[in-house]
Amino acid sequence: MKIVGLIGSLRKAAFTRQMMETLPEIAPEGMQIEMAQIGHLPFYDEDLRVEGEAPADVRALSRKIAEADGLIIGSPEYNRSFPAVIKNAIDWVSKEPEKALMGKPTLIATQSPGQLGGILSNYHLRQVLSVSGAVFITGGEVAITRIGEKVADGRVSDPETRDYLRSHLDKLADLSRRQG
């Protein structure tokens, strides 16, 4: 099972990156998670299409997501919502011919050093992605609180948080099998 991950923070040592890079280590057997780069995409602009084609990097991302069995979007919370880099990627991919997000099993995972775990970012991502046809796992959101206390050496180290993430990866695997 092939899963694509999008990391909504560009900083190398970002908590979101640490959370997302933990996922391949704890994924269920048979699940491969590949992080796709999105920080280099141009701002969404229809004028950048040449003869109806989006820029090559956009096309490559859209194909990668379309060919995957599922999608994970990891996000911090900036000003009570998700970062522009994620919105930009969603806007581009949602307009591509393969409609890569339509029916795509999707897990949203947010985190925050605070007490809310990025839950408003999570909520806003659900709103935006639902318009594009993404299908979400059920049974609670991944919104990790006090993330700074739960990471070490670039990965989530807290055993309970790793189990929590693993249980949601299992749900994504189940949804992907049902959708497939």
Image (cartoon, rainbow, N blue to C red):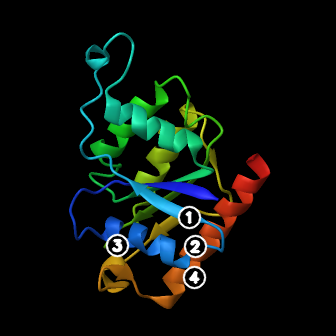
In depth, the one of 88 and 60 nearer the eye is 60
What amino acid is found at the position of numbered circle 2 in the picture?
Answer: Ala
Name the one closer to the observer, 165 or 36.
36
Question: Tag 4's secondary structure?
Answer: helix
Residue at numbered disc 2: 27
Task: Rate crowding at label 4 as few (under 14), some (14 to 19) or many (20 or more) other CA atoms within 10 Å.
Answer: few
Residue 142 in view of the camera? yes
Q: Is residue 166 left or right of residue 15?
A: right
Return the disc, 1 or 2, that comes first in the chain's sequence: 2
CA–CA distance between discs 3 and 4?
Answer: 15 Å
Q: Are marks 1 and 2 in contact (CB under 8 Å)?
A: yes
Q: Position of residue 19 (x, y in %)?
A: 40, 71
Q: Secondary structure at mark 3?
A: helix
Residue at 34 percent across and 72 percent down: it is: 18
Q: For the residues carrying marks 1 and 4, which lies nearer the camera in this image? A: 1
According to the picture, the residue beneath numbered tag 1 turns out to be 32
Query: Closest to the observer: 163 or 97?
Result: 97
Q: Nearer the viewer, mark 1 or mark 3?
A: 1
User: Type of residue at label 3?
Assistant: Gln
Using the numbered discs, state the Cα–Cα distance from disc 1 to disc 2 in whole angstroms.
7 Å
Disc 1 from disc 4: Cα separation: 18 Å
Circle 2 Cα neighbour tier, 10 Å, few/some/many (<14 / 14–19 / ≥20): some
Q: Badge 3 is on which residue?
A: 18
- The answer to which quarter of the image holds residue 32 is bottom right
Residue 101 rendering spot, x and y as whole percentages: 56, 37
